[in-house]
Image (tube, rainbow, N blue to C red):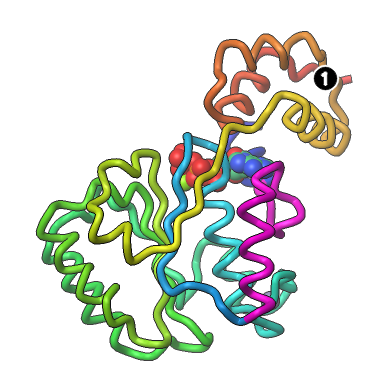
Amino acid sequence: MSYLVLARKYRPQTFEEVVEQKQVTLTLTNAIKAGRVAHAILFSGPRGTGKTTIARILAKAMNCEKGPTPRPCNVCRSCMEITAGAATDVFEIDGASNNSVDQVRELRENARFMPAHSPYKIYIIDEVHMLSKSAFNALLKTLEEPPPHVMFFFATTEPHKVPVTILSRCQRHDLSYISIDPIVGHLEMICGKEGVKMERFHTTWCYRHWVCSIMIRFSSFQIQSWTVT
Ligand SMILES: Nc1ncnc2c1ncn2[C@@H]1O[C@H](COP(=O)(O)OP(=O)(O)OP(=O)(O)O)[C@@H](O)[C@H]1O
Ligand SMILES: [Mg+2]
Ligand SMILES: [Zn+2]
């Protein structure tokens, strides 16, 4: 089994399942309950710490048939589409390869139309710092006066490259590195479910060598220590 399959299989689908990052998930949970979720949110933090995962859960929370709710049902059409990465009203855009002003203008045009079957049209833009200067300027107009049915969730590993004009219009959540104990606990849970034995020594070894991401830890862990019992 490839690590990607595992990472996807065990990608948290609710805020409770997210390892650490409690400050972020709690703030979002409270905002959802209070009906005060910002229309533009920026998730920043090291690779593999949960930026895309949390953005997707938030998209579910907003568009769930039972929502907006901090506990999306994960069984309605909207939730299932988001889990499958094929949601009609949730657009995942890679900022690195869609960074031109024309692409942002096109996005702006599309954003004007109402969502197909959900309350919100949600744009998740990954690596948003890769947008060109003119693309950021084009985006700024929409961020200043977003249509009420539109939300933007941005993710970046390099927030210092995002223009201040954009940052000032976003609510920002900084994700931190995940510490060793929760990671080990998480991996032990996965091992238990997969019916494989985990050598603690190996995880520590992985941790020392790849401090930056549990996604990467997943793969090293896979290569080094998945021994089927
Ligand atoms: N906080 C977390 N709790 C549990 N699993 C996590 C967490 N963060 C990451 N993962 C696991 O790692 C995988 C990658 O996470 P994700 O795509 O959310 O990271 P990211 O911060 O967006 O990274 P990148 O900067 O590379 O885009 C997920 O599928 C999930 O299995
Ligand atoms: Mg990501
Ligand atoms: Zn749902």
Q: Residues within 10 Å of mark 1 (few under 14, many from 20)?
A: many
- Verify whether residue 33 appears in magenta: yes
- The part of the chain drawn in magenta is 11-34
* Residue at screen point 65% across, 79% down: 34
The majority secondary structure of the magenta stretch comes to helix
User: Label 1, on which residue?
Assistant: 198
Q: Element under label 1?
A: loop
The quarter in which the N terminus is drawn is: top right
Q: Amino acid at mark 1?
A: Met
Depth order, front residue of 42/6: 42
Give yes or no for residue 216 being in the magenta stretch: no
Residue 113 rendering spot, x and y as whole percentages: 32, 89
Image position, residue 144 (x, y; %): 27, 76
State the residue in front, 139 or 80: 139
In the depicted structure, whether residue 45 falls above or below residue 134: above
Q: Is residue 5 visible?
A: no
> Of 50 and 193, which appears nearest the observer?
50
Q: Residue at x 81, y 14 (%)?
A: 200
